Image (cartoon, helix red, strand yellow):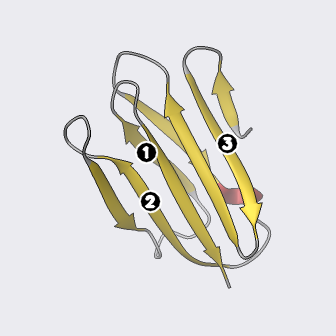
């Protein structure tokens, strides 16, 4: 677990092959920004794909974050929403 607080939010990470998968869940009934610090990744990063909540419930948004690399990211989540971040390694 990268960060979290019971009944509020959680950010988890898992590595598979040449990718890290980071997932975050907002457990509240209000919008929340979740912080993701990628500095724990030791390998060079090729690109980052973010699958996040869209404007409305049941919509999602896909963004390529390749220019940001290993940094601290804030991801806006809808109430009871979340995100998945795929970090592809070189």
What residue do we see at 36% from left, 65% from top?
Answer: 63
5 or 80, which lies in front?
Answer: 80
Sequence-earlier tag: 1 or 2: 2
Nearest to viewer (mark 1 / mark 2):
2
In this figure, which residue is indicated by the disc labeled 1?
A: 75
57 or 66, which lies in front?
Answer: 57
Which class describes the residues within 10 Å of circle 2: few (<14), some (14-19), or many (20+)? Answer: some
Which class describes the residues within 10 Å of circle 3: few (<14), some (14-19), or many (20+)? Answer: some
Give the residue furthest to the front: 58
Quadrant showing the C terminus: bottom right
In this figure, which residue is indicated by the disc labeled 3?
A: 12
Residue 5: % across, % down: 64, 20
Instruction: Identify the secondary structure beneath mark 3.
Output: strand
Residue 77: % across, % down: 38, 36
The image shows residue 76, relative to residue 14, as above or below, that is: above
Sequence-earlier tag: 3 or 1: 3
What residue do we see at 19% from left, 37% from top?
Answer: 56
Give the residue furthest to the left: 56
Residue 89's label in the rendered image is none
Disc 2 to disc 3: CB gap under 8 Å: no
Calculate the distance from the C-alpha at mark 1 to the C-alpha at mark 2: 9 Å
The image shows residue 49, relative to residue 66, as above or below, that is: above
Disc 1 to disc 2: CB gap under 8 Å: yes
- Residue 57, located in which quarter of the rendered image? top left
Instruction: Identify the secondary structure beneath mark 1.
Output: strand
In this figure, which residue is indicated by the disc labeled 2?
A: 50
Instruction: Identify the secondary structure beneath mark 2.
Output: strand
């Amino acid at each position: 677990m990268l960060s979290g607080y019971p009944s509020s939010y959680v950010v988890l990470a898992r590595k598979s092959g040449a990718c890290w998968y980071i997932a975050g869940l907002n457990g509240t009934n209000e919008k929340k920004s979740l912080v993701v610090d990628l500095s724990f990744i030791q390998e060079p990063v090729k690109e980052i794909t973010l699958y996040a909540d869209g404007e409305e419930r049941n919509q999602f948004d896909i963004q390529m974050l390749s220019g940001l690399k290993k940094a601290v990211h804030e991801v806006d989540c809808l109430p009871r929403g979340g995100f998945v971040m795929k970090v592809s390694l070189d």
